[in-house]
Amino acid sequence: MSAPSEPRTRELWNHRVEDPYSWLENPDSEDVLRFLAEENARFENEMSRLGPLKTSIFNEIKGRVQETDLSVPIKKDQWEYYGRTEEGRQYGLHCRRLAPVNGGPPGSEIIVIDENVLAEGHVYFDMGVFDISDDHSMCLYGVDTDGDETYRLYLLDIDQNESSPLGIEGVMSGSAWDNHGTSFLYIRPDETHRPFQVWRHVLGSDPARDALIYQEDDPRFFVGLSKERDSSYVHIGLGSAITDETLLIPADDLTAEPVVVAPRFFGVEYSVGHRTAPDGEKRLFMHTNRDAKNFRLLSAPAELILAGDAPEPTWVEEVPERSEVTLAGFDVFRQHMVLVERSNGLLQLRIRDLETGDDYVMDQPESVSSVYPGANPESDVTTFRYVYASMVTPPMVCSYDLIRGERTVLKQTPVLGDFDSAVYETDRIWASASDGTEVPILTVWRRDRGEGPHPAVLYGYGAYEAAMDPSFSIARLSLLDRGFTFAVAHVRGGGELGRGWYEAGKFENKTRSFTDFEACARELIARGTTSAAQLAIRGGSAGGLLVGAALNLDPELFGAVVAEVPFVDVINTMIDTSQQLTQIEWDEWGNPLESESVYRAMESYSPYENVHPAAYPPMLVTAGLNDPRVRFWEPAKWVMKLRDNNTGTNPILLKTEMGAGHFGATGRYDAWRDEAEILAFLVDSLDAPAAVD
């Protein structure tokens, strides 16, 4: 399709660039919508021959999932809350029952919300707010039916099973009830879709009379809401990419003036938790990187902080910074604290007795695994719920007795069929980057597949200090059973090896993320695990940037590419301040409007800017028409430019979800079909063998 308008010209830092595909940046244009429809038809036509393979993989995924299932109930006061799924239904049910008393049976099930009912008639459905009042009589919930991540609020009287709209629309996720169930706080976005205001609504009142509690005018900061597990305070969290500030409001009185825990200071991150000790002492604990790159834990009397005039020495150090261990987070209870730590790139849990100060690291059964806190809504408890998983072990919800040091497995995600974790093997290997840095790679494969090389998928993300920890995937088994190796590259820019690892792969150093990824690909090939023709790369969002930039480095290194909602038009997005994430993203990527060095760095790696004539491998690129995070035109423009520069004959496909956003389909069967489609594309592109029986 030819461009229906003149291309836009960008002039910045004495550099003039013409963008021939800028006409795609108009979601209201009939020409653009027609283009997307034609691309979707082209995609369906190209993929039609893979229909039987897609169906086979979908059935494999579906056949391994226990479709009618129940989550482990979570106790809160006299109630147990849990989720439930039913065979043949796309969405889950939110349920509760009275908790057992003195060893007796639990009460009868009450269905609080059936998402299937709310989703009827909608292609897309997401419930981004689900908040039970402290007296357990009401549920505040929010519904999004187009994928733009804004919600309409409803109030459910649980006992009467009566739901009504509140007349509050266009809000963001996040809410907090007062302790009396008479009012709640919610969040509104600005014109760039940035959550920036906190409002208070009193039940039974006209929403037009809602009170503005807080407004964040710095465009680099997002606003969030949460509530302490002991119902003491509501947190208004203010965060940019690298700076935090927390305001507290007594949950007993949402009309009180918010109090700043610690004023924002550029580059200082912190989060806060509250504890009431057995002797009645109330303290705030602060997890922060202030004067501690790998974070430390401080505490202070809550009354002094809330008074607003506490002297600087008020905060005392509870857990100092350690050079080899990153303190990733904490959970504080009445008698114990659980520290979430990252050591040598892997997560661990440290248990601390707050009365004696004694602590120890909880043992786990596998060396390469993940462990992280689960749902723990009560503060006066002596058990801690957590989740354990690895690349070969399905997730287990566990309860840990903090006094006896004993673990109980409450439930492990069932995998139906002939699944046997012993058939698969996982390891962590290392690749040498171009500057000699050792980069870890998680790998998993089927033991009985024979000698290599074999088809492989290398996955990566590498931004925002996000860590791609070992995890289990039912869908991934369809690749492993066809002889694939699945690998995850922990490139710089991610958070696997601490704050220094993250900082080494951002701003002007961002290219290290891409050369690290390339080094991981070459390591898999050098080991004989795979070959260039059999190696696919996959990433989404910022991970789409990763695979796009790696593709530009060496298109012949890969046999296939999957880029899901990829952030590939970096410069044009980072200079457009009307977009939702642009200004807050400057703390992650840099500001090319103010810094020529940042601009030149982006110019060197932006996938869209660096497409060049080459024989590109088969590519599958996805987008979401209503995606507020990566606008649909980024992948669309990229695909157009790739095709214009493709000297080979491999297909470069674009699929746009016309009724969804950043996270694609929401119904579980639809999500499985989408994943089966991607896996079928990979199996076909790499000419993989049939699945092992």
Image: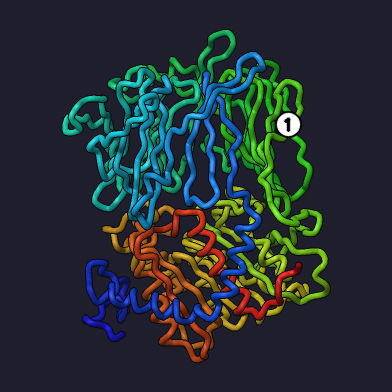
- At which x and y percent is residue 634? 38, 69
Q: Is residue 77 visible?
A: yes
* Residue found at x 44% / y 64%: 565
Secondary element under disc 1, as helix, strand or loop, is strand
Depth check: 567 or 476 in front? 476
580 relative to 273 in the view: left or right: left
Depth check: 594 or 279 in front? 279
484 relative to 98 in the view: left or right: right
* Residue found at x 59% / y 38%: 71
525 relative to 86 in the view: left or right: right
Quadrant placement of the C terminus? bottom right
Q: Is residue 309 visible?
A: no
Residue that badge 1 annotates? 408
Q: How many residues crowd around disc 1 within 10 Å: few (fewer than 14), some, or many (20 or more)?
A: few
- At which x and y percent is residue 273? 51, 27
Q: Quadrant of residue 657?
A: bottom left
Q: Quadrant of residue 352?
A: top right
Q: Quadrant of residue 38?
A: bottom left
Tell me if residue 497 comes above or below residue 597 in the rendering.
above
* Residue found at x 58% / y 45%: 68
- At which x and y percent is residue 520? 67, 68
Depth check: 602 or 553 in front? 553
